[in-house]
Image (cartoon, rainbow, N blue to C red):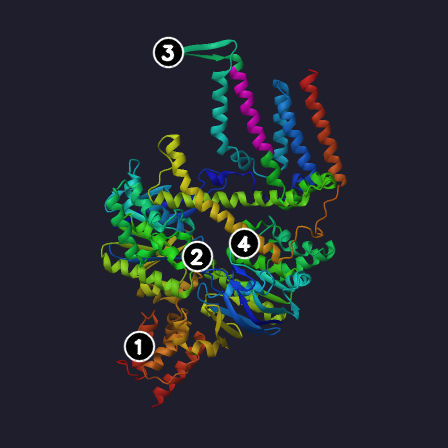
Amino acid sequence: MIKTQNLSFIYREDNGVAAAGEEAVLKEINLKIEQGSFTAVLGANGSGKSTLAKHFNAILLPSGGKVYVKGMDTSVPENMFPIRQCAGMVFQNPDNQMVAALVEDEVAFAPENLGVEPKEIRRRVDECLAAVDMTKYAQSSPSALSGGQKQRVAIAAALAMDPEILILDEPTAMLDPKGRKEVMRTIKTLNRENGITAVLITHYMDEAAQADRIVVMDNGKIAMDGKPREIFADVEKIKALGLDVPQVTELAHELSRLGIKIRPDILNVDECFAELTRLFGGAAND
Amino acid sequence: MLKDITIGKYVPARSPLHRLDPLVKIIFTAFYIAALFIINKPLPYAVFTAYTLIIMLISGIPVKMILKGARPMLWIFIFTAVFNVFMTTGETLWAFDIFSLSIKITREGVISGAVLTVRLFYLVIGTSLLTLTTSPLDLTDGIEKLLSPLQKIKVPSHEIAMMMTIAIRFIPTLSEETDKIMKAQTARGADFETGNIIRRAKAMLPLLVPLFISAFRRADDLAVAMESRCYSSGGKRTKMKECRFTSFDLRAVIIFAAATAALMTTQYML
Amino acid sequence: MIKTEKLCYSYEQDTPFERRALYDVDLEIRDGSITALIGHTGSGKSTLIQHFNGLLKPTSGKIIIDGDDITAPNADLKRIRRKVGLVFQYPEHQLFEETVYRDIAFGPKNMGLNKDEIDERVRKSAYLTGLDEKYLERSPFDLSGGQKRRAAIAGTLAMDPKVLILDEPTAGLDPKGGKDILSLIERLHTENKDMIIIFVSHSMEDVARIADRVVVMNEGRVETEGTTAQIFSNPNRLRGIGLDVPQVTLLADKLRSAGIGLPDDIYTVESAAREIAVRLGGDTHA
């Protein structure tokens, strides 16, 4: 779906050479995102994860190397619109990405830009609002919505281009726990039921734990890449990268440090509970 | 206070005013303002007030909310009124001396003070009604259509319209932001309320830096978000809701024309 | 000590848009405590804290700080604001001066202190917030996200407040940045035993880590309050009003329901690990 080849990026550059005092934000990144997958990208502030995301829909173009979206080279100008149509993007601040004063007009904005027939726009708007469970609010003003609802509208607005990939750049960073859950549920449903390839950039470990794959960025490079279970099992490395692990994963890590033989790759409360009841059961049988 | 500004806010509703073609509404507003500055007799003012009331009532927006939009302008109204009352020469109604200044209040002063204040007030009400009942995107449409004849002489009408829409769309956001920054600085001992004008203006300076930075950051975010959704200024756009001049608009235009004629009759014939 | 008596507040009072935000809030916050204020968006947390330094005036009811009724008509608001420092959400968005030094000096300058006193305050606050002196002469806009936030907090600390209130101090930071801010709050607490620290948070992990008391707000009222252990010993009550609890609290609750005897004040990874390890025969001295 998305492939990067030795992707490098420098904000101020001259023919691929960094301007004085400038360091590359992305350094020779090779990454492949599979169709239908759900990938979370983690990394401390300044690790380059947002910069990477902006390469996936040709908002930024590589200083060195290539990015291919569905085989289309992002550096070819003619590919810009097909790429953006294919890779929809949702941003952090819900207020700063809204153009329209009515929810349904917001969702219609992208297909209108693409020159889609009015009837087809109407159909897509209705379908996308239903997909994020916001049909009820079609006639509302975005300013009247909660943070989670606004982000769901932003997702619908990207879906209206009929994309195959959804790139979400910290969509939950400014939301409360309830809003975060709404957005996560929406992303997972779209990924599982509608087959949308999802790339989620986040600071929240519990959100990353729900993906099929985690890519950890550090200082412009990929520091770790694997299944959440494998990534979080390495508590020390994750912490050294300025990140965290879910509390129960850390608990398992602590327990094994205290001499308890517990699985190190626990991801959520249910798994931890099952593992501990097994251990307690065993202890009771001794 | 800043949050009270209603210019730039849009309130969705299903009123006849909301349904009207935005181009028609913009033209109506222009006529409304022109008429406001033409009339100068009590009877036309009474008729004009009645018109305004009717429009407010059919707008589907609570009258109190429309009136509240005028509240931040209160000081401008008072200043205009006072300035005119004291500065206009004519038939003396009342004269008195303060220190060595002799102050005269004239009949003409009172009238012109009142007239100007009323005009300003209706100006705010009229423009508020336009933005309250027209979504910014529709407003863009209207402005674009209004400017479209100029496209022949290479005026980028769509870009101008889009620019205006975004500016209007950001007014409420930025006024909220100003409120927030003011509070934060008040909490750090800044004083926006006491002292003379120069002191207060000086206290305002620290507000402007974060406000501008925020405006630029938001603008940048919005630009990226729009580009991500395939917006391009030269692109060929379609509209989900095509604004067509309907029979409803035609009826509105006829009613409006008749009303304007009646108003002008009261001004010039009676 | 901060005390509120039957505090009520309505936005846009006497207009058709009147919205009640606080109902009969009775609270006592003791000197030297770190109190967390938790609750949904719209539960009244932010409205409440703006009352503590007179930015909002109650519709009815009283607020008494150290015996001073700050709601009295003749209350000296300037003095109150010196005593009660308020750090808003995303405070770094309000930085405005050319240098970090001048930004921190804004408060003390408004207080009318002389140059030497201002200098002392600026350096002390920079030290307290862990900002290296070398940053003082830099533009605030050249700092990283976490550093900017610390500079903004330093700006409030420079007023030498007796009460420090922070609205979502870790929001939007990466895990390490967030932890740094929490450590900063803990350090302030140890350096100044009498200071009252109040913080609003959506992160139960943060609350569990540093708060000694918790006030739970729900729909404009105080739902419940108590020590952190008391509040988290009843996770179902919090979940009942749609709030989260730390993962380990949830886990401990599940284990207890399954008949495993655990104390009911487990809310940090460390305490959970210790208690579970003891019962599983681990080496708790490791």
Please tell me the numbered disc located at residue C275. Answer: 1
Residue B159, compared with residue C223, is above or below; it is above
SS for dot 1: helix
**Residue receiving disc 4:** B221
Mark 3, chain letter?
A: B
Residue topped by disc 3: B100
Q: How crowded is mark 2: few (under 14 residues within 10 Å), some or many (20 or more)?
A: some
Q: Mark 2 points at which residue?
A: C40
Q: What residue type is labelled 3?
A: Ser
Residue at 55% across / 27% down in the picture? Answer: B120
Residue B10, placed above or below residue A33: above
Amino acid beneath label 2: His
**Regarding mark 2 in the picture, which secondary structure is present there?**
loop
Residue B50 location (% of width, % of height): 62, 27
Give how far across and how far down residue A132 sits, in percent. Answer: 59, 61
Distance, label 4 to label 3, CA atoms, is 60 Å
Cα separation, mark 4 vs mark 2, equals: 27 Å
Q: Residue at x 42, y 78 (%)?
A: A234
Task: Point out the frontmost of discs 4 and 2.
Answer: 4
Using the numbered discs, state the Cα–Cα distance from disc 3 to disc 1 in whole angstroms. Answer: 88 Å
Region in magenta? B109-126
Q: Of the numbered discs in the image, which one, if any, rests on residue A272? A: none
* Residue type marked 4: Asp
Res C89 visible: no
Mark 1 closeness class: few <14, some 14–19, many ≥20 residues within 10 Å: some
Identify the residue at horizontal 72%, vertical 55% (top origin): A115
Between label 1 and label 4, give the one nearer the viewer.
Answer: 4
Residues behind callouts 1 and 2 on a single chain:
yes
